[in-house]
Image (cartoon, helix red, strand yellow):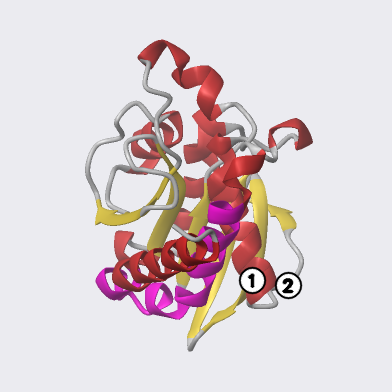
């Protein structure tokens, strides 16, 4: 069993914020693989289903970002999961838009969702860092992450979520390295196709 967690804020007004790309990834996975409807469990929205040959739980904490660890730790403790069975999807300022990086453990680089999870259960979990880019000025970060994705972001965001879903069976069986490689390759191919379409 695997637990895929997306980080975000629960109210509708936050739905399209850059900070909520983790929720967007979880919703996309639920739709792509025909998961059962989300239900209220463990201070979050939980859906059950299968990706590839693996049973997977999808979780969106409903505690707001800075208390994400309350929800995640409850689910992890109930199902008695270890770090190898947990993947957390979250927004990463230090990666260009549409870039993925996988890692296991590490710090939280000022991300309040990760900080909360670390406080409740430590840093032993897998991470899917989803690039949203940086506004270029530290003073603008809060407004940027809590801002809505621009119309110009629609194409790469749609392609990115599709690539995250298309190769999810690799992630579900624990092959993070190949998952990362396939998603990166897919995004490169999409960029090339867009450039050719635009005559670049």
Q: Is residue 165 magenta?
A: yes
Asked if 74 appears above or below 63 in the picture, the reply is below
| Residue 176 visible in rendering | yes
* Residue occupying image coordinates x 53% and y 59%: 198
Residue bearing mark 1:
48
Q: Do the residues bearing badges 2 and 1 touch, measured as CB atoms within 8 Å?
A: yes
In the image: residue 64, left or right of residue 76: right
Residue 78 in sight: no
Work out which quarter of the rendered image holds the C terminus and state it: bottom left
Which region shows up in magenta? 155-179
Identify the disc placed on residue 36. 2
Q: Position of residue 105 (x, y in %)?
A: 24, 49
Residue 178 place in picture, x, y as percent: 28, 75
Number of marks in picture? 2
Residue 5 magenta: no
Residue 137: which quarter of the image? top left
Which residue is nearer to you in this view: 171 or 152?
A: 152
Q: Residue at x 39, y 30 (%)?
A: 134
Give the numbered dot on residue 102.
none
- The main secondary structure of the magenta stretch is helix
Residue depicted at 53% across the width and 48% down the height: 22
């Amino acid at each position: 069993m695997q637990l895929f967690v997306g980080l975000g804020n629960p109210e509708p007004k936050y739905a399209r914020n850059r900070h909520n790309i983790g929720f967007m990834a979880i919703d996309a996975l639920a739709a792509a693989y025909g998961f059962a409807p989300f239900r209220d469990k463990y201070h979050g929205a939980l859906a059950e289903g299968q990706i590839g040959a693996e049973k997977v739980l999808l979780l969106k904490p409903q505690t707001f970002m800075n208390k994400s660890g309350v929800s995640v730790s409850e689910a992890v403790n109930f199902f008695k999961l270890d770090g190898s069975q947990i993947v957390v999807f979250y927004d990463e300022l230090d990666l260009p838009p549409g870039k993925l990086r996988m890692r296991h453990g590490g710090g939280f680089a000022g991300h309040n969702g990760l900080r909360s999870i670390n406080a409740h259960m430590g840093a032993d979990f897998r991470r899917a860092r989803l690039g949203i880019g940086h506004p270029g000025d530290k003073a603008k970060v809060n407004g940027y992450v809590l801002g809505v994705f621009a119309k110009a972001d629609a194409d790469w965001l749609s392609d990115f979520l599709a690539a995250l879903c298309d190769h999810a069976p690799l992630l579900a069986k624990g092959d993070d390295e190949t998952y990362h490689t396939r998603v990166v390759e897919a995004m490169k191919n999409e960029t090339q196709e867009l450039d050719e379409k635009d005559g670049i």
